[in-house]
Image: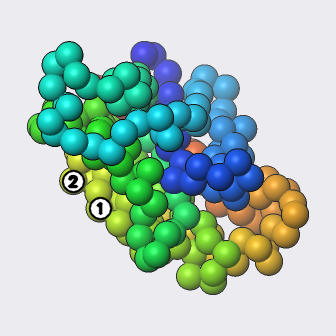
Amino acid sequence: MTEPHVLILVGSLRADSVNKQIAQTAVAMFPTGSSAVVYGALSEIPFYNEDIDVDGQVPVGALDLRAAAEEATALLLVTPEYNGTVPAVLKNAIDWLSRPYGASAVQGKPVAVISASPSGYGAKWAHEHARKAVGIAGGRVLEHVELTIGGTSDKFGAAHPRENAVVSAEISEVVAELVRASNELLAV
Protein backbone atom coordinates (compact mmCIF):
# COMPACT_ATOMS: atom_id res chain seq x y z
CA MET A 1 0.00 0.00 0.00
CA THR A 2 1.39 3.38 -0.95
CA GLU A 3 -1.08 5.65 0.78
CA PRO A 4 -2.54 5.79 4.28
CA HIS A 5 -5.48 3.45 4.77
CA VAL A 6 -7.13 3.35 8.20
CA LEU A 7 -9.30 0.53 9.49
CA ILE A 8 -11.99 1.73 11.89
CA LEU A 9 -13.45 -0.64 14.47
CA VAL A 10 -16.62 0.44 16.30
CA GLY A 11 -17.46 -1.04 19.68
CA SER A 12 -21.22 -0.73 19.24
CA LEU A 13 -23.41 -3.01 17.13
CA ARG A 14 -26.49 -0.80 17.49
CA ALA A 15 -27.70 0.53 14.11
CA ASP A 16 -28.15 4.13 15.29
CA SER A 17 -25.13 4.20 17.58
CA VAL A 18 -23.56 7.62 18.08
CA ASN A 19 -20.21 5.82 17.98
CA LYS A 20 -21.00 4.56 14.46
CA GLN A 21 -21.91 8.11 13.51
CA ILE A 22 -18.59 9.34 14.89
CA ALA A 23 -16.82 6.69 12.80
CA GLN A 24 -18.75 7.86 9.70
CA THR A 25 -17.74 11.43 10.48
CA ALA A 26 -14.11 10.36 10.67
CA VAL A 27 -14.29 8.54 7.31
CA ALA A 28 -15.57 11.70 5.63
CA MET A 29 -12.61 13.69 6.99
CA PHE A 30 -9.79 11.68 5.46
CA PRO A 31 -7.96 13.84 2.94
CA THR A 32 -7.38 13.00 -0.71
CA GLY A 33 -4.55 10.52 -0.96
CA SER A 34 -5.72 8.57 2.07
CA SER A 35 -8.70 6.39 2.90
CA ALA A 36 -10.59 4.79 5.75
CA VAL A 37 -13.18 2.09 6.10
CA VAL A 38 -15.48 1.14 8.97
CA TYR A 39 -15.31 -2.61 9.49
CA GLY A 40 -18.91 -3.76 9.51
CA ALA A 41 -18.73 -7.43 10.45
CA LEU A 42 -17.58 -7.55 14.07
CA SER A 43 -20.82 -9.29 15.05
CA GLU A 44 -19.90 -12.25 12.82
CA ILE A 45 -16.71 -13.11 14.72
CA PRO A 46 -17.01 -15.74 17.48
CA PHE A 47 -15.42 -15.10 20.84
CA TYR A 48 -11.70 -15.72 20.78
CA ASN A 49 -10.82 -19.32 21.61
CA GLU A 50 -7.28 -20.59 21.16
CA ASP A 51 -8.68 -24.05 20.35
CA ILE A 52 -10.10 -22.74 17.05
CA ASP A 53 -7.21 -20.37 16.31
CA VAL A 54 -5.27 -23.05 14.46
CA ASP A 55 -4.61 -23.61 10.75
CA GLY A 56 -7.73 -24.82 9.02
CA GLN A 57 -10.08 -23.94 11.88
CA VAL A 58 -9.86 -20.15 12.18
CA PRO A 59 -13.37 -18.77 11.58
CA VAL A 60 -13.82 -16.86 8.32
CA GLY A 61 -14.88 -13.74 10.22
CA ALA A 62 -11.62 -13.71 12.17
CA LEU A 63 -9.58 -14.30 9.00
CA ASP A 64 -11.39 -11.41 7.29
CA LEU A 65 -10.74 -9.09 10.23
CA ARG A 66 -7.07 -10.00 10.31
CA ALA A 67 -6.78 -9.45 6.55
CA ALA A 68 -8.42 -6.03 6.84
CA ALA A 69 -6.00 -5.07 9.63
CA GLU A 70 -3.02 -6.36 7.64
CA GLU A 71 -4.04 -4.12 4.70
CA ALA A 72 -4.40 -1.06 6.93
CA THR A 73 -1.60 1.33 7.76
CA ALA A 74 -3.32 2.38 11.01
CA LEU A 75 -6.38 1.70 13.13
CA LEU A 76 -8.98 3.90 14.75
CA LEU A 77 -11.07 2.41 17.55
CA VAL A 78 -14.36 4.15 18.34
CA THR A 79 -15.98 2.91 21.51
CA PRO A 80 -18.80 3.45 23.96
CA GLU A 81 -18.44 2.26 27.53
CA TYR A 82 -20.37 -0.76 28.79
CA ASN A 83 -20.32 -1.33 32.55
CA GLY A 84 -17.14 0.65 33.01
CA THR A 85 -15.08 -0.95 30.25
CA VAL A 86 -14.73 -1.78 26.56
CA PRO A 87 -17.70 -3.54 24.92
CA ALA A 88 -17.12 -7.26 24.40
CA VAL A 89 -17.34 -6.99 20.61
CA LEU A 90 -14.40 -4.56 20.46
CA LYS A 91 -12.32 -6.48 23.01
CA ASN A 92 -12.98 -9.67 21.04
CA ALA A 93 -11.74 -8.01 17.83
CA ILE A 94 -8.57 -6.89 19.61
CA ASP A 95 -8.09 -10.44 20.95
CA TRP A 96 -8.32 -11.94 17.45
CA LEU A 97 -5.99 -9.27 16.06
CA SER A 98 -3.43 -9.91 18.81
CA ARG A 99 -2.61 -13.34 17.42
CA PRO A 100 -0.40 -14.96 16.44
CA TYR A 101 1.61 -13.84 19.44
CA GLY A 102 4.50 -11.60 18.41
CA ALA A 103 3.24 -11.21 14.84
CA SER A 104 -0.20 -9.70 15.28
CA ALA A 105 -2.09 -7.98 12.48
CA VAL A 106 -1.66 -4.67 14.33
CA GLN A 107 2.02 -5.07 15.16
CA GLY A 108 3.68 -1.63 15.08
CA LYS A 109 0.72 0.08 13.40
CA PRO A 110 -0.41 3.48 14.67
CA VAL A 111 -3.64 3.34 16.66
CA ALA A 112 -5.90 6.06 18.04
CA VAL A 113 -9.03 5.72 20.17
CA ILE A 114 -12.14 7.89 20.31
CA SER A 115 -14.69 7.17 23.03
CA ALA A 116 -18.15 8.63 23.44
CA SER A 117 -20.90 8.36 26.00
CA PRO A 118 -24.09 10.11 27.09
CA SER A 119 -22.48 10.55 30.50
CA GLY A 120 -20.28 13.54 31.13
CA TYR A 121 -17.43 11.13 31.76
CA GLY A 122 -17.05 10.41 28.03
CA ALA A 123 -16.37 6.68 28.35
CA LYS A 124 -12.89 7.41 29.72
CA TRP A 125 -12.50 3.96 31.27
CA ALA A 126 -13.34 2.25 27.98
CA HIS A 127 -10.96 4.66 26.26
CA GLU A 128 -8.13 3.72 28.62
CA HIS A 129 -8.89 0.00 28.44
CA ALA A 130 -9.03 0.01 24.63
CA ARG A 131 -5.69 1.83 24.44
CA LYS A 132 -4.14 -0.64 26.87
CA ALA A 133 -5.49 -3.75 25.13
CA VAL A 134 -4.53 -2.72 21.60
CA GLY A 135 -1.10 -1.61 22.83
CA ILE A 136 -0.50 -5.00 24.42
CA ALA A 137 -1.73 -6.59 21.17
CA GLY A 138 1.15 -4.87 19.38
CA GLY A 139 -0.38 -1.63 18.12
CA ARG A 140 1.58 1.61 18.49
CA VAL A 141 -0.91 3.72 20.43
CA LEU A 142 -0.48 7.40 19.60
CA GLU A 143 0.07 8.65 23.13
CA HIS A 144 -0.66 12.31 22.37
CA VAL A 145 -3.93 11.55 20.56
CA GLU A 146 -6.86 11.19 22.95
CA LEU A 147 -10.47 12.09 22.31
CA THR A 148 -13.26 11.37 24.78
CA ILE A 149 -16.66 12.85 24.00
CA GLY A 150 -19.04 13.14 26.94
CA GLY A 151 -22.63 14.30 27.12
CA THR A 152 -23.48 13.03 23.64
CA SER A 153 -27.25 13.19 24.21
CA ASP A 154 -27.08 16.87 25.12
CA LYS A 155 -24.34 17.67 22.61
CA PHE A 156 -25.97 16.04 19.57
CA GLY A 157 -29.63 15.45 20.40
CA ALA A 158 -31.15 14.10 17.18
CA ALA A 159 -28.36 15.64 15.09
CA HIS A 160 -25.45 13.73 13.58
CA PRO A 161 -22.07 14.37 15.30
CA ARG A 162 -20.72 15.86 12.04
CA GLU A 163 -23.10 18.78 12.62
CA ASN A 164 -21.26 19.76 15.82
CA ALA A 165 -18.38 22.02 14.77
CA VAL A 166 -16.31 21.47 17.92
CA VAL A 167 -16.57 17.67 17.80
CA SER A 168 -15.95 17.61 14.04
CA ALA A 169 -12.79 19.65 14.54
CA GLU A 170 -11.61 17.27 17.28
CA ILE A 171 -12.26 14.22 15.08
CA SER A 172 -10.43 15.95 12.23
CA GLU A 173 -7.37 16.34 14.46
CA VAL A 174 -7.39 12.60 15.25
CA VAL A 175 -7.69 11.81 11.53
CA ALA A 176 -4.79 14.14 10.71
CA GLU A 177 -2.58 12.43 13.30
CA LEU A 178 -3.42 8.96 11.96
CA VAL A 179 -2.60 10.07 8.41
CA ARG A 180 0.67 11.63 9.60
CA ALA A 181 1.64 8.49 11.52
CA SER A 182 0.68 6.31 8.54
CA ASN A 183 2.84 8.39 6.22
CA GLU A 184 5.76 7.97 8.62
CA LEU A 185 5.21 4.20 8.61
CA LEU A 186 5.00 4.10 4.81
CA ALA A 187 8.22 6.11 4.49
CA VAL A 188 10.21 3.44 6.37
Residue type at numbered disc 2: Ile
Q: Which residue is mark 1?
A: 132
For the point 35% across and 30% down, the residue is: 62
Query: What residue is disc 2 on?
Result: 136
Which quadrant holds residue 139?
A: top left
Residue 57: x and y in percent read: 22, 22
Q: Residues within 10 Å of mark 2 (few under 14, many from 20)?
A: some
Rendered image quadrant of residue 165: bottom right
Q: Is residue 130 above or below residue 44?
A: below
Residue 54, compared with residue 19, is above or below; it is above
Contact (CB < 8 A) between labels 1 and 2?
Answer: yes
Q: Position of residue 89 (x, y in %)?
A: 44, 50
| Label 1 neighbour load within 10 Å: few <14, some 14-19, many 20+ | few
Q: Nearer the viewer, residue 89 or 181?
A: 89
What secondary structure is found at the residue carrying circle 1?
helix
Front-lying residue, 120 or 35: 120
Local SS, label 2 = helix
Q: Which mark is residue 188?
A: none
Q: Quadrant of the N terminus?
A: top left
